[in-house]
Image (cartoon, rainbow, N blue to C red):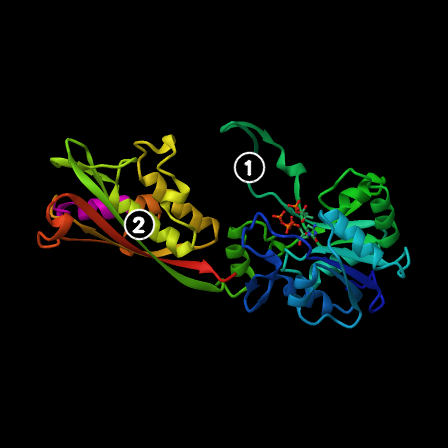
Amino acid sequence: MTDSAPLSSGSVAVVLLAGGVGARAGFGRPKQLVPIGGKSVLRWSLDAFAAHPAIGAGVLVGDDDVVAAAGPLPASWTTAAPGIERQQSVANALGALADWSDDAILLVHDAARPGVSAAVIDRLLAAVAEGAVAATPTLPVPDTLITEVDGVAGDVTDRSRIARVQTPQAFRLGALRRAHAGAGDEAATDDAQLVRRLGHAVATVPGDARLHKLTYADDLIILSALLGGGKAAMRTAVGMGYDVHRLVPGKPMWIGGIEIEHSHGLEGHSDADVALHALTDAILGALADGDIGDHFPPSDPQWRGAASWRFLAFAAERVAKRGGRIAHVDLTIIAEAPKIGPHRAAIRARLSEILAISIETISVKATTTERLGFTGRREGIAAQAIATLELPEN
Ligand SMILES: Nc1ccn([C@@H]2O[C@H](COP(=O)(O)OP(=O)(O)OP(=O)(O)O)[C@@H](O)[C@H]2O)c(=O)n1
Ligand SMILES: C[C@](O)(CO)[C@H](O)COP(=O)(O)O
């Protein structure tokens, strides 16, 4: 706490918002329950507030499952039910603080921002104790900002006048109560905006990179680096894929993402690249995300003649969207002819391009079936693949 703004111990309340479902993160459960560095995202900020001497009470907003998963709350904390939107969740929490005076200071914080520090709390409390009705942490914008319409870059926006808004935000409780009471149907994405609508100035204090918000799956990688000792809790997932296509004369032969000179090509709805199909299914299998036919149904005319690298790139993109990475792929092509050996290097290079992973982590093998079976009779080509993924533990 700064010397100029003494606050008595326990004179501040905090609202910790954990009522969202985390739809954009897509973890299949609320993002605030995902672990980083051995504890949940929610617990990081709960512990930071519980350890701050100025904070005398708290309201955790969350449903029963979230409250149960949060673990023990400090004795002076209570809970409130979430609303449909963030703003309603804050309003519900204000109801739980009815005994607190209008002069008290309240912090409102997104549980989705685990990196709360005592230094940021101190800066906010000092700003309010020194006369501001509200205060918010902000960070400068590091990138050039432009307008963009339909994939075309437009004018540059003056970023010297723009800041990124973080939480926690601090308020005189009375002002926040009036702001919420007068908000009506006009929604705001944060509480500082509501207080500004009453005509109050909102002071800004320096924010903190560690207050980065977990919004999309990729944010977990950033937060794990910032808070979790550099490494997200990851699990290994392995998937396998298998595919067969019939050989027919006079068609281009696409295999492993490259075109090979051959008397025959493969028959199929798309370009029939049997190797890429097996690999796509292996990745989807490791993601437990259905199979290639679910995502690209043969009944859909838009995939007629489609280049199969698009299916593989789609699967790789789904790994990235989950915050994961492809650690290794192993592909076996089963064919009497053409000979794959002379094309192995080109196939590995093409797979490296499509999957955006190092060629060192791509294995391409080929075998015959000693003239046995449909592959031995040159009626078709088969491929099998195994994909090993690293996925966030969530
Ligand atoms: N009805 C809601 C919606 C959000 N929040 C909380 O407000 C913070 C910021 O919201 P956001 O990042 O949008 O979280 P979600 O609503 O969970 O995410 P999404 O919009 O992707 O579903 C989060 O800590 C979230 O748990 C809340 O308490 N009640
Ligand atoms: C409150 C907030 O975190 C400030 O940056 C943000 O507005 C909430 O996120 P949302 O994506 O608008 O829900």
Would you say residue 346 sits in the magenta stretch?
yes
Q: Residue at x 67, y 50 (%)?
A: 166
- Please, is residue 218 above or below residue 249 in the view? below
Instruction: Residue type at mark 1: give it.
Output: Thr
- Please, is residue 41 above or below residue 368 in the view? below
Q: Which residue is mark 1?
A: 144
Q: Residue at x 66, y 39 (%)?
A: 162
Would you say residue 365 sits in the magenta stretch?
no
* 252 sits to left or right of 130: left
Instruction: Residue type at mark 2: give it.
Output: Leu
Q: Nearest the camera: 91 or 299?
A: 299
Query: What span is colored magenta in the figure?
Result: 339-351
Q: CA distance from mark 2 to mark 1?
A: 39 Å
Q: Position of residue 267 (x, y in %)?
A: 22, 36
Q: Residue furthest left?
A: 371
Q: Residue at x 54, y 64 (%)?
A: 228
Q: Is residue 38 visible?
A: yes
Q: Position of residue 319 (x, y in %)?
A: 43, 51
Asked where in the image residue 385 lies, by quadrant, the reply is bottom left
Q: Which residue is mark 2?
A: 279
Under circle 2, the secondary element is: helix
Q: Is residue 261 visible?
A: no
- Asked if the residues shown at circle 2 and circle 1 are in contact, with their CB atoms under 8 angstroms apart, the answer is no
- Please, is residue 125 above or below residue 313 in the view? below
Q: Residue at x 76, y 48 (%)?
A: 88
Secondary structure that dominates the magenta span: helix
Of label 2 and label 1, which has the lower sequence position?
1
In which quadrant of the rendered image does the N terminus lie? bottom right
Under circle 1, the secondary element is: loop
Cβ of mark 1 under 8 Å from ligand 2: the answer is: no
